[in-house]
Every structure is written in structure tokens, then in C-alpha cells.
Amino acid sequence: MKQAYQAPAWIYQALQVLRPRPRLTVSQWAQAKRRVTSGAIPGPWNNSVTPYLVGIMDAFSQETVEEIVFAKPTQVGGTAAMENMIGSLVDQDPAPTLVVYPSDDLAEATAETRLIPMFKSHPDMAGKFREHESKKLQLSFRDMWLYLTGANSPADLSSKPIKNLFLDEVDKYPGATKKEADPISLAKERTKTFFNRKIFMASTPTLRTGYIWREKEAAEVEYHYFVPCPHCGTLIELKFAQLKWPDKEQVPDPAQRAERAVYVCQACGSVLTDRDKGPMLQAGRWQPVRGTSKRPRSVAFWLNTLYSPFTPFVEIVREFLRSKDDPDLLHNFVNSWLAEPWEDTKLKTSAELVLERQTGLPEWALPQWTKLVTGGIDVQENCLYWTIRAWGSGMTSQNVAHGQALSMAEVERIMNLPLYLPDGQQRVVNLALMDSGDQTDQVYEFCLRNADWALPCKGTAAMLSDYRLSTVNKAGSKAYGMKLVLVDGGKYKDLIAARMRRQNGTGAWMVYQGCDLEYAQQVTAEHKVTQRTGSREVQRWVLKTSHGDNHYLDCEVYAAAAADVLGVRTLFLEEERVAEQAPARGSVQKVTQEEAWIQARENWL
């Protein structure tokens, strides 16, 4: 029997050299080869320190995933995770790569203090790094180039095709200009020639309209990190609302209150402390909270500071107590600690809030305190929305009636209906403003025909005052020279939202008993958000949903502007004047000889 041929040992050794190395996921690569040269924990990378980063890093290794979004607080390791992805590419999958930072200066500093030391820290990367061929923002390797740039350099963002794109702290990027698209769009254009491109984007959120939040919302699947409660075993998401501490009455000193902060499990009510956090993080997992695609092209990950192994619960509460009464500090806390977009909660409204403002009066009944009655009319292509509101001192107001009309004749009839106070006195609408943005000529003619109680209005912005009286200057119009009210809708929406949050009573914005849900939804269809315009942040009222109806809100804006035109803010002065003229109770009013003579002969006048 022939003996099987056995190749010499040197052939086996040669084949072992030629055999391709097994491809490591990013987290495996980091555990094996990454050495942290600076930061809180220098030395070999250890996935167990921040276990929530494993899923984010390994999403970069999934062939079907093209875009990864990480909305995060500060100091949870997001930048380090991005550096691990870059190092893994250099070592295992070289291809042209671009990293975009908020500025060129930050790009240079990061390359010098973090990236280059990382490349030199392991022989597999150091052997490929060609430092002598590299520049500050162009690092050369044996099989690839790594480009770094700032988002403030449009020319660098729109040249050279790249396969891998990294975008760090995107909410600090400048916005689009008249000459250039926004930096993210410019950078993404460079990846179009690669079918297997990879895009990683990370940032602390700023506004709901900011880059990172929009990208998170646009991702096909969104993941949150869930950890098991050590008491009941339920997988829970760590939320700021579950942090509990003594109230001010029990413990007046804020520092002592923060020291006694604990986390209360939302599933079983058990108390969790920082000692529980480590084991919980180790046993945690990313779970989808939105989207069901099994092979998504884009994924988003969201995390808040409660998960940070470096930040105890006590420190989070301490920062909140320090920030809660200062809008600027609270803004930073919401962004940098909770990883949520900032919104001005003072101007939040809801349909439920409107329905809470119901009084005991039925529809069409005027409150006893009524001094003015105004209307607002919103003109649509095939119908008109209208509202009637009663006004008293201190800007106190109540919706008396509202509805939808099919013609201007119907609106004319409604606005001339008699209204009654509880004592039987009769009132009518003193002034109604009618939107002239649609069917302008017909609106002008309507207001001209009803000039005793109606005026046209037009929305505008950037006025110093809430409204301004102008004139119709349309050549050839019958209404030429008629008064036109210019209305800053944003200012009146501020007023309505603020007054709506007051409890019923003096100064409140109220509605009649039995107010319908549709009205409540429409009058709260918008919310005020902060938007970035270039380098500026501006606040604007926008629809909460793209297809929401806000006709009744516009009507209420016009009714409020009409009240201003009639001097609603000075009604209290009239009350004070009457009070000053009225004799004190029990007092004897002195009458001059001339006044006595006139009073005796009043019937002559």
C-alpha cells in the first residue's frame, strides 16, 4: 500500500502566509489591536467598559448597512467608536476615506492628538502608515488615503470620490448657503460612485430641525439600548423621568437632594443605584423601537447620559438642579446630557390643554366681564373658517363660537347675530379681521360692504409691533385707500400659547363649554421650534405634522389682532378712571353752586 504524499513543512508555512486573515468586526478589531493613547482610560481598548458601543461599531461591519447614525450625549465614547471604525478600515479594508469635523482647526488637532497616535500604536497599522508622504489633513497609507477636513471648507467636500465617509458632531456644521448645499449633502455626493459605501454620522442633538435628529428620524430602523432590571429581570430603557430625589420641602439643600438620587425601575418599582449599572450594561442589548426592516440600509442608535459608566446618577441630578431655572443651562442639559433636541416648553400646546380651558358657559353666551367682541375669518379656496371671541380686562378672553361657512354671505349673517350677556344685555361683533391672502378682490369688496365691522388683514413678520395699520393700495380696486391690518402671526401665537397655559380666570384664554375636538386640534396644530438659518438660530411656528389643519388657529390670531386694534390692552385704564370718579361708599359728594344750578335744570338739555 502506497504511503500518502506529505508536502514539506516550508510549503505549509508558505500557504499559511498566503491564506487571507479572518475579517474581524470593528469591536473585535478594537479589542485586539486598539490602544487608547489619551482620555479617561488610556491603554488597550476594552469593550466591557462601554458595552453599548459594540452594537454601533459592528453595524459598520454589516454588509447590508450603508448608513449609521448615532445621536448621543457628550462623553459616552462616540468619537472613540468612530476612530475604531477608521482604524479597522486602515488595517483590514483600505479604501479612500473622508472624515469631516466642524472646522479645519478641529480636524488638524484631532489628527495630531488622536488619529496619528492610534495608527502608530499597533504594528499592523504602523507598517502601512506613510508619515513622510502625509500632510496635516491628508494621511497616506500603503493602500489608501485618509482625508480630513472641516465642514467650513466647501471645496474640500466636493472633490475626490470616496468610499467611506465619517461625519463628526454634525449639528455644529454650518448650514447651506445661496452658493453651496449643506456640508453633509456635499460630502455624501462624493460617495455616489461606490455601491458598497459606508457613512457614519454622530452628534449631540441641538434642535429638532438639526442634522442629527433629522437623520435619526429618517433612518429605516431606530435602536435604543435596553438593560435588565436586577430585581425583576425586565428589559428597561433608562429614562431621566425615573430618577427620583427628595423634594425641596423635605431637603432644602440642592446638593443634599442630588446625593440621595436613585433610579426607580419603571417595571417593578425597585430602587437601582450606580452599583447596579455596570452589570446591567454588560447584559444590555440594542432593540428596535421604530422600523421593522430585517435588512435595513440605514440604522440609527440613540443613547442618553444615564448609560454612561463615567457619570453617576447623582451627577446627572446635580446638573439638572443647577440648570433647571436658567433657560440657557437647561438647553445645554437637554442636548448634552439627555441627547434630546431643545424645545421651548413654555410655548407647547395641545388639544387636551384647550379642552381644559372650558368654562361653564354654553356656546353663543357672552361672559359677564365682556367689554369687546371680535371675530377672525380665514378664507380658503372652497370655504371659510370663522371664530368669535369675547374680551375683558387683562386680556381675558373666551371663544364664544366658531365654525365653517360655505360662503361669504353666510359669514356676514353669522357676524351680525345678536349676542347676550347673562343680564340680558345685547352685543354684536365690534370688529372682525378677514384674511386677504386668498380671493383678495372678493375679500376687499366684502370688507368694503361691511366697513362698520370688518377689515381685511394680511400676515407679515419682522415688525416691531404686533400689528400695523396700512391701506389697500391696489390700483383699480374699489377698496383703494381702505384700512388694511398687517398682522405678525408669530407674536399672536406666542400670546395665545402663553395665555392658554393659564388657569381659567383673569388673563386666561378660554373656550365655551362643549368645545369640539376638531377646533382644539386645529388651534394647537403648530408648535414653536428653533431653526438654524446659516449661522443663526431663529424660532418659528411650524405645523406639528405636514398635513395638519391650522385654520382655527389663524382665525384666533385675527380675532386677537382685532382686539388689539380696538385697544383691548388698555381696558383696565377705563376701569381705573371709572373707579376714581365713583364716590367712596358712605361719602358725601360736594356740589358747587354752578353744578347745583345745572342739575336742577337738567331737563332743559
Image (cartoon, grey):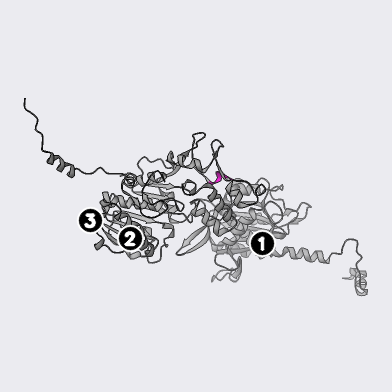
Q: Residues within 10 Å of mark 2 (few under 14, many from 20)?
A: many
Q: CA distance from mark 3 to mark 1?
A: 74 Å
Task: Give the foreground label among 2 and 3.
Answer: 3
Q: CA distance from mark 2 to mark 3?
A: 17 Å
Label whose residue precedes the other's in the sequence (2 or 1): 2
Q: Position of residue 432 (x, y in %)?
A: 64, 60
Label whose residue precedes the other's in the sequence (3 or 1): 3
Residue 68 painted magenta: no
Q: Position of residue 346 (x, y in %)?
A: 59, 55
Tell me the residue that label 2 is attached to: 148
**Please, which residue is most extreme toward the left here?**
2
Is residue 558 left or right of 111 when viewed as pictured? Answer: right
Name the residue at 74% across, 63% down.
572
Name the residue at 57% across, 46% down.
261
**Please, which residue is most extreme toward the top here?**
1
Q: CA distance from mark 2 to mark 1?
A: 58 Å
**Type of residue at label 1?**
Ala
Tell me the residue that label 3 is attached to: 142
Q: Position of residue 114 (x, y in %)?
A: 35, 57
Q: Residues within 10 Å of mark 3 (few under 14, many from 20)?
A: few
Tell me the residue that label 1 is attached to: 563
Name the residue at 10% across, 34% down.
6
Is residue 483 left or right of 590 when viewed as pictured? Answer: left
Magenta residues (range):
240-245
Is residue 73 left or right of 329 when viewed as pictured? Answer: left
Task: Give the foreground label among 3 and 1.
Answer: 3
**Type of residue at label 3?**
Arg
Q: Is residue 204 above or below residue 285?
A: below
Q: Nearer the viewer, residue 474 or 148?
A: 148
